Amino acid sequence: MTYAIIGGVLIGFAVSIMLLFNGRVTGISGILGGVISPRRGDILWRLFFILGLVFGGFLIRLFHPESFIQLTPYNVSDYVIAGVLVGIGTLLGNGCTSGHGVCGISRMSTRSLVATGTFIFFGVLSVLLYKWLRGGV
Amino acid sequence: MKSLTAFIVGVIFAVGLGIGGMTQTHVVKGFLDIFGDWNYALIGVMAGAITTHGIFYYFIKKRESPLLDVEFHLPIRHDLDKRLIVGAALFGLGWGWGGICPGPGIVGISSFDPRFFWFVGPMLAGMAVFKVVEKKIFG
């Protein structure tokens, strides 16, 4: 739990820097969406942000590799299904865990509160369905 | 300058996700498995992030503008529509199915674990297809 809270505080700190300096919400799906259909003069910071995420991933790999240990089974089709649903769902619903769950709730946005409640509810449902079909988490 | 801050934010964000457990599919799925062997640790990530940003947001919003831009770019809508609910529902289904959301998906690429490539590729493809369809439907 201590690690979870430290991780959360770091995330909260990171999105605060983004807001204070760039005046932006740190919503990963929104930032990715803006790279996929870019507007003039509004793409470079997005690419650098993504580069930062990947670089941060390398730091984790070097200094805290436990964070990349996966205990769920590896089924290509499951990740493809998950990826497509996440890609379409986050752009349709204007946000994911970061944009709605962290930034939006911190601003007490009604839309984000409802979106977060909805995706957690359907996430729970999805895990239930997965366990029922596959016989395990 | 904005690109530099975005890069730094990306690095800190990624490390936070990793330390918090968000880059591990069984931790995320365990959090959503409330009727099974529930792993509530991710409540700590949500609470830590929301509390921290909530406090900073209170002070930052008092400013006229951010440090590197003339204005804040914050969402202004308050209405609840079908798009928001259906989108969040689809996202939730995908999140629970794979145990990965967009941020950890990108961060996970650095682990070279193929599951992240199989997640991120289709996610970006889904986003691209959506952008095309969106223009046709919503204009």
Image (spheres, grey):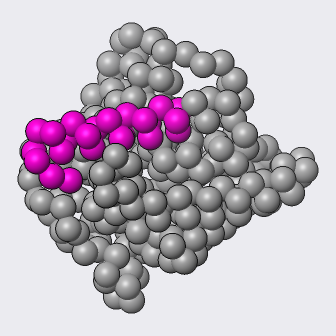
- Queried whether the magenta region covers residue B101, the answer comes back as no
Q: Quadrant of residue B109?
A: bottom left
**How many tags in the picture?**
0
- Queried whether the magenta region covers residue A135, the answer comes back as yes
**Residue at 15 percent of width and 52 percent of height:** A136
Q: Which residues are magenta?
A: A115-137
Residue B91 rendering spot, x and y as whole percentages: 37, 36
Residue A104 rendering spot, x and y as whole percentages: 64, 42
Q: Is residue A6 above or below residue B90?
A: below
Q: Is residue B136 above or below residue A87?
A: above
Left-right relation of A89 to A40: left
**Residue at 19 percent of width and 42 percent of height:** A130
Q: Quadrant of residue B116?
A: bottom left
Residue A47 rendering spot, x and y as whole percentages: 45, 57
Residue toward you, A78 or A18:
A78
What secondary structure prevails in the magenta region?
Answer: helix
**Residue at 37 percent of width and 57 percent of height:** B38
